[in-house]
Amino acid sequence: MATQNATIGSCYLTLGQISFPGDSGAIAFLNNGDMIGHVVGASPHIMSFIQDLTYQLDEAKKFNSNLTI
C-alpha cells in the first residue's frame, strides 16, 4: 500500500504517458495552440496528468483575491 497520498483537482488524463521525470510544471497545449494547463504528474507507461488551467487560476484567486488575468 502506498505511503504517500495526493489530491489533484480537475485533471486531464492522457492516453499513454506523454511526460517524463522533470516535466512537471510544463505547459500543455491542444493541437490548435490553446493552453489547457500544466503537467502535474504521470503514471509511468500508462498516462500523464494535466491540471486544467481554469481550475489553477480559480484556486490561486482563493489565496489572492486581487489576482486578475
Image (tube, rainbow, N blue to C red):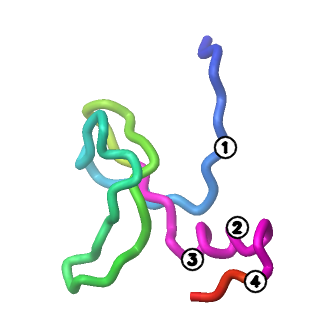
Classify mark 4: helix, strand or loop: loop
Magenta span of residues: 49-65
Sequence-wise first label, 1 or 3: 1
Answer yes or no: do the residues labelled 1 and 3 have beta carbons within 8 Å?
no
Numbered tag placed on residue 66 in the rendering = 4
Element marked by disc 3 = helix
Residue type (three-letter) at the residue carrying disc 2: Glu
Quadrant where the image shows the C terminus: bottom right
Image point 61% across, 74% down: which residue?
57
Question: First in sequence: mark 2 or mark 1?
Answer: 1
- For marks 3 and 4 on the same chain, the one whose residue lies earlier in the sequence: 3
Instruction: State whether the magenta stretch is mostly helix, strand or loop.
Output: helix
Quadrant of residue 62 within the rendered picture: bottom right
Q: Which amino acid type corresponds to the residue marked 4 in the rendered image? A: Asn
- Are circles 3 and 2 on residues that touch, CB within 8 Å? no
* Residue 22 locus on image (x, y percent): 30, 38
